[in-house]
Image: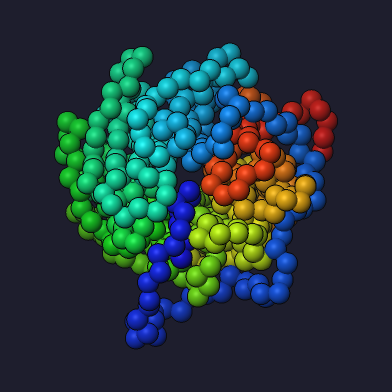
Amino acid sequence: MKPSTFCLLIAAFGIPVGAYLVRPQPAAFGPVAETAAAETDFPRSRLPLRREPLGPSAKYPPRITNVQIVDFDQDGMQDVIACDALRNQVLWYRQSPRGEWEERLLGDDLVAPAHATPVDLDADGDLDVLVSVLGNIYPDDTHVGRVVWLEQAGDRFIRHLLLDDVRRVADIQAGDLDGDSDLDLVVAVFGYARGRILWLENRGGGRFRDHEIDYGPGAIHVPLADYDGDGDLDIATVFSQNEEEVWGYENLGGGKFRSRLLHLTVNHDVGSAGLVQTDLDGDGDADLLWPLGDNLEYQYTYPQPYHGCVWLENRGGWEFVPRQIAQFGGCYAAAAADLDADGDRDVVLVSLFNDWQTPGHASVAWLENDGAQGFTTWQIDDRPTHLVTVACGDLNGDGRDDIVAGALHVTRSDDDLGRMAVWTSRQDEGASSP
């Protein structure tokens, strides 16, 4: 019963008893006793990471909804793409020279942009941007959502409206779903009480035809991968409204998909906050990370003992085994990266709803992978607070992954109005792992 990243409140709908009784029973991921304390701070990491602000300081409570790290201009240096729902803009933070950031506008008048997906949609050799437009950051079940393509054309970006007359759109991903060698789109229509999963068939010339895959409110992300190893792209999503469920959609070819329930939980308060695809155990298949900690439906948000991150391990045959790899109050986003450069995938988490009234509580943490998927949680920072989005990549060119995160203030704010920040590795400072 949770809204998506930044999509505030809950839809209350009953579950027919008969339907509930015949549903597959979820695998437990380590239930936490209700009397257990929420995890709000951790031992300090000794990774040599230095925090610096990115972009202008905030005069008003910030609303950064998404950040991405990508070499957008293909000059060999990683840049940052950000969605700003306060300014209703998609922004490019370009490095030139390295370590110095220039803000460039990619698109404006985009009401509450939720997600930016850099992709060469027209196959002309440069990166465009697909923008998931909520249309309203607050609960809204009207047709305010949009799918917008910002086509890169030299030094300008041409706006194309690919889909409208839909409810709030939270995510768009691109891939060849029908095997015809062009890029189709998958769209998470979050809505509020009603939503959908759509795939948009590329008909050429910037034209797309929409097809419904599933119907349900609260779809947050739609990561694409070959989850069953049969050579084509499948889809995964998490529904966060009526239920807290993770679903897969097996690509059968010819634009047909088979729905598969991957996991559900009987705790409707876990607060699904997203879904991230990564091969966490390095076995060559696509796993999922499921951050939990959205409790925006409560007037007084507070970290809960069941908040944190669940790893859904792909065992093959559409079996995903859940395991809670971290408890972290108010956890709202996850990213996978090799932070300590030891050859395995670690995890970075950020928190929107930690206990900010107590100084020192974590806003950014990382989970150190021991190589056998044993994870130790280390605190990176306690500022900025109210973080909802995180991405990792090598920003300073030293061969190690760095971090960028963005803040969204929708509840009461403290004095910290940090908007975006980067944490870059500083090996010359001589700190040791972790």
* Residue at 28% across, 62% down: 215
* Residue at 63% across, 34% down: 418
* Residue at 30% across, 35% down: 148
Q: Position of residue 211 (x, y in %)?
A: 20, 53
Q: Is residue 159 left or right of residue 51?
A: left
Relative to residue 43, is residue 246 depicted above or below?
A: below
Q: Quadrant of residue 237?
A: bottom left
Q: Position of residue 200 (x, y in %)?
A: 24, 46
Q: Is residue 323 left or right of residue 275?
A: right
Q: Position of residue 155 (x, y in %)?
A: 36, 14
User: Which sits in the foreground, 320 or 5?
Assistant: 5
Does residue 339 appear in the picture of this structure? no
Q: Is residue 23 left or right of residue 412?
A: left
Q: Is residue 203 left or right of residue 248?
A: left
Does residue 415 appear in the picture of this structure? yes
Relative to residue 355, is residue 430 depicted above or below?
A: above
Relative to residue 78, is residue 100 depicted above or below?
A: above
Relative to residue 141, is residue 31 depicted above or below?
A: below
- Quarter holding the C terminus is top right
